[in-house]
Image: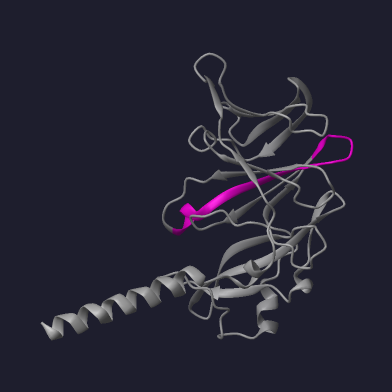
Amino acid sequence: MILYFYRTAFLIVFYSIFFINSSNAQYAFEKHSAPFYKTYNTWKEYDKIATKGTYDCTLSIDQFFDNKDSLTIQLTWFAAQIDFGMIRIFRNKRQIQKMKQSGSFSPLTMKGGLVMVSDINGDGYKDVKMIQQGTGNGVMGMLVKVLYLFQKNDALFQKISFDDMVFEEHRAERDVDDDGNHEIITMNLEHANGHSYWAYNVFEYSDESLRNVNFKVDYPILIQYTYKRNYEITQHMSMLQMKKYEREFPSEYDVK
């Protein structure tokens, strides 16, 4: 009975410490502030593949613009041209922009995609972020397409998209230098010296494009890919050696 008591007490303490430590674990960039997002996923589906060869998903956000006009985003997939999709943007149901998107908006992934709204770059205008889940297997199931619509002062949008890798949760932008413009953190899988690593680069939206700003926080950093979530910067290489994994732009970077 006494042995059972001590064994039970030990397990309670062990699991308490384990879960407390796990819940407090953070990546280095997570100490910086993140934007506050409103999220939407009320997509309307228009399947016209059989009749017109297209598949559309549309999402509307009421009172998006400063004068309370609504914003509607329509994503179109073409059965005959699967190497690109189309983005149409409407203000109060009037189309104001149309742009191609490299790659396709597959019917398997576009419906139900998360849409987040916030002033990401701190210019006073609401921006849009969309995440489209990929269809890969294994570790490649973490591959996503990230698409930003940065609102400009003429109420039009600058589209920026790229491929990224994420765990089960959304990776928020972080204001690493406290200037109000939240930097974008990207993650890539790299291989070196018989190990796999997650490599993190830092980008800033400026002058209608992204630019690498690793110098602000001495990035990139590499974190070893292990059987459980790891948050520690690797000790297998120096910060100087990590510099070789710096990227000028994210993977499959595209600007429209």
Q: Residue furthest top?
A: 51
Q: Is residue 85 left or right of residue 53?
A: right
Q: Find residue 29 and report its horizontal and vertical position in percent.
A: 65, 69
Q: Please tell me which residue is depicted at 60% across the width and 85% down the height of the picture.
A: 237
- Asked where in the image residue 182 lies, by quadrant, the reply is bottom right
In-image side of 240 versus 216 (left or right): left
Residue at 68% from the left image edge and 72% from the top image edge:
220
Confirm whether the magenta stretch covers residue 155. Answer: yes
Is 220 inside the magenta-drawn segment?
Answer: no
Considering only vertical position in the picture, is 76 above or below 182? Answer: above
Residue at (67% x, 61% y) in the render: 185
Instruction: Look at the image and give the residue range highlighted in magenta.
Output: 139-157
Residue 46 position in % (x across, y down): 55, 21
Residue 2 versus residue 99 in the image, above or below: below
Nearest the eye: 110 or 93: 93
Image quadrant holding the N terminus, namely: bottom left
**Which one is nearer the viewer's eye here, 160 or 153?**
153
Residue 95 against residue 108 in the figure, above or below: above
**Residue 208: where, in percent of width, then height?**
84, 48
Frontmost residue, 112 versus 194: 112
- Is the C terminus in the top left, top right, bottom left or bottom right quadrant? top right
Q: Quadrant of residue 206?
A: bottom right
Colouring scheme applied when the structure was drawn = one colour
Percent from the top left, x then y, of residue 104? Answer: 59, 37
How many marks on residues? 0
